[in-house]
Amino acid sequence: MDGAALGLGTFLQHLINGLTLGAIYGLIAIGYTMVYGIIRMINFAHGEIYMLGAFVAVTGFTLLSALGVQSVALGLIVVLAASILFTAAYGWTVERVAYRPLRGSGRLAPLISAIGMSIFLQNYVMLTQGARPKPLQPVLSGGITLWQGETFALGITYIQAFIIVLTVALMASFTVLIARTPLGRAQRACEQDRTMAALLGINVDRTISLTFVMGASLAAVAGVLVTMYYGVVDFYIGFLAGLKAFTAAVLGGIGSLPGAMLGGLLIGLIEAFFTGYVSGAYKDVAAFSILILVLVLRPTGLLGRPDIEKV
């Protein structure tokens, strides 16, 4: 393999790794952007909801292994369903307890409440699960070799392919849900004017609660995927992942569903390429530097136009 081919293979491998990581960030970022779009509030506890999903995944896979369940497909379905169920319940509870009573107040009180809920959930998991990282045996191993050279092999693992395919499927499903279902129309109406939406017969409280539940469900899926990808979780993973996902939502244009996904992919690609070509120690610096640069040149984000249809 000559130098040019090796360089191209390395570039494509970083591209696959970046898309995988970006898909996970995008799934989390959608939760931020949906909540902001409908009630104009940053849910800083959303990263911890994602962390709860990851812990449910570790517990679920461990229990299924202890029960002798060998089917990967069955295990994935059961764990995804359990994780979505648990985290959706937490998402609903957080909205009902920490945010709804403050809905009529200024912006500062819900912001402080969100930060407090984030810290509470971190400590809650630390007390109940322990402070040590929780490892998980590989659930889906193996992969496909796309290009084999003398000293380099370009490939995609099964878990990477699963993450990318599942993310695309979820994005398509949510786009249809938002654009063509009564719930999506109710969400868009509440985003435009909650008072008018209530006068038209829309249950605003239920619509907002369902928005939190939907965002938490996507965070649960991200938690399961990242657990399978890295094989270890701890009670602090929600903070950094949540911060990066929030960055992705802002980068793409917070309030925009496609913008959240685009921002997530960009953050993932920036991290992967910076790690591969420069240094992994400063990949976060690179991601946030580009965010600052974009916001200086385009304060609304890449897709955050005033006339864009938001949720």
Image (cartoon, grey):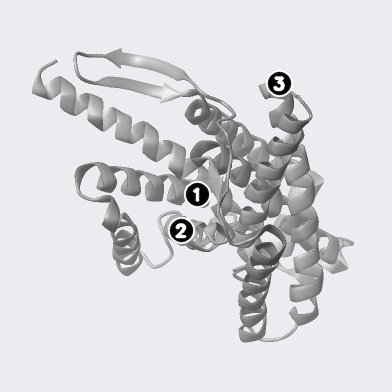
The residue where tag 2 is placed is 244
Cα separation between marks 2 and 3: 35 Å
- For residue 25, the mark is 1
Q: Which residue is mark 3?
A: 70
Residue type (three-letter) at the residue carrying disc 2? Lys
Give the quadrant of the C terminus.
bottom right
Vertical relation: 20 (above or below) 112: above
Position of 250 with respect to 225 (left or right) is left
Residue found at x 26% / y 48%: 274
Q: Toward which corner of the image does residue 59 lie, by quadrant?
A: top right
**Residue 173's spot in the image, x, y percent?**
67, 36
Spot occupied by residue 124 in the image (x, y as percentages of width and height): 70, 67
Instruction: Residue type at mark 1: give it.
Output: Tyr
Circle on res. 308? none
Q: Amino acid at mark 3?
A: Gln
> In the image, residue 303 lies at what x, y percent?
45, 54
In this rendering, position of residue 173 left or right of residue 239: right
Quadrant of the drawing holding the N terminus:
top left
Q: CA distance from mark 2 to mark 1?
A: 7 Å
Element at label 2 = helix
Q: Which image quarter: residue 46? A: bottom right
Is 38 positioned to the left or the right of 248 in the image? Answer: right
| 108 sits to left or right of 260 | right
x 23%, y 21%: residue: 152
